[in-house]
Amino acid sequence: MNDDWSAPTQASNNALRAQIDSMLDTFSAEKAALLDARSQATQLVTAWSADRLVRACGTIAGISEVHIEPDAFKRSTPESLGRSVTEAIAQVAAQAAQIQEQALAPLSDLSANMPDLPDLIPGAPSMKDLIAQLTPPPPPAPEPVTDSPHSLFDDTDDEEGEYFRNRGYLR
């Protein structure tokens, strides 16, 4: 009588063991992909403004440095230099977001094929939700900067602008 129920139970146990082994293999692959994504998150990204006056550096965590060329104040106005800073920072943010997306893509692909914990254990935390939280939407495009009514000078060669561009204040 003992053999009547042990064969189906053994087969069921073997199938369950195979499923758990598959899930553990997928989990190991996800863990490796997550560690790789974490290392890529520290990858430094550098971008220059189109006028080559501003260089920004950063990671997906944010901007770590903004460099303004020494002759920027001779070659630019405050408004256009502000636009250059914004442009360089926006490029760093876009490149960092692309790196993040590429780093998390293998993790998303792996988890799509694996049952999520809540599918097996009601109320358990979801790996798929965690991955969704790690991939925020891309940053919005910066709005164009309008001329400030409080600017010192504009792009025209007025007397005040010429004074600052030629470093008349140092005489």
Image (cartoon, rainbow, N blue to C red):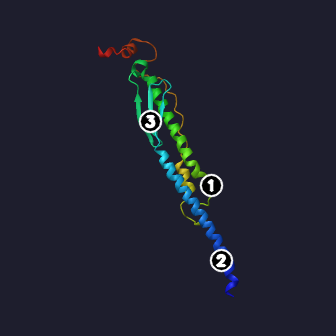
Mark 3 or 2 closer to N-term? 2
- Judging by the rendered image, the residue that carries numbered circle 2 is 10
- Judging by the rendered image, the residue that carries numbered circle 3 is 57
Three-letter residue code for mark 2: Gln
- Secondary structure beneath disc 3? strand
- Secondary structure beneath disc 2? helix
Instruction: Say above or below: 145 vs 45.
Output: above
- Label 1 neighbourhood size at 10 Å, few (<14), some (14-19), many (20+)? few
Q: Tell whether 2 sits left or right of 92.
A: right
Three-letter residue code for mark 1: Ala
Residue at left offset 53%, top offset 42%: 99
Q: Is residue 117 visible?
A: no
Q: Position of residue 59 (x, y in %)?
A: 46, 41
Quadrant where the image shows the C terminus: top left
Q: Position of residue 1 (x, y in %)?
A: 69, 88
Q: CA distance from mark 3 to mark 2?
A: 59 Å
Mark 3 or 1 closer to N-term? 3
- Closer to the camera, 46 or 129? 46
Q: Which mark is residue 112?
A: 1
Q: Tell whether 152 sits left or right of 40.
A: left
- Closer to the camera, 52 or 168? 52
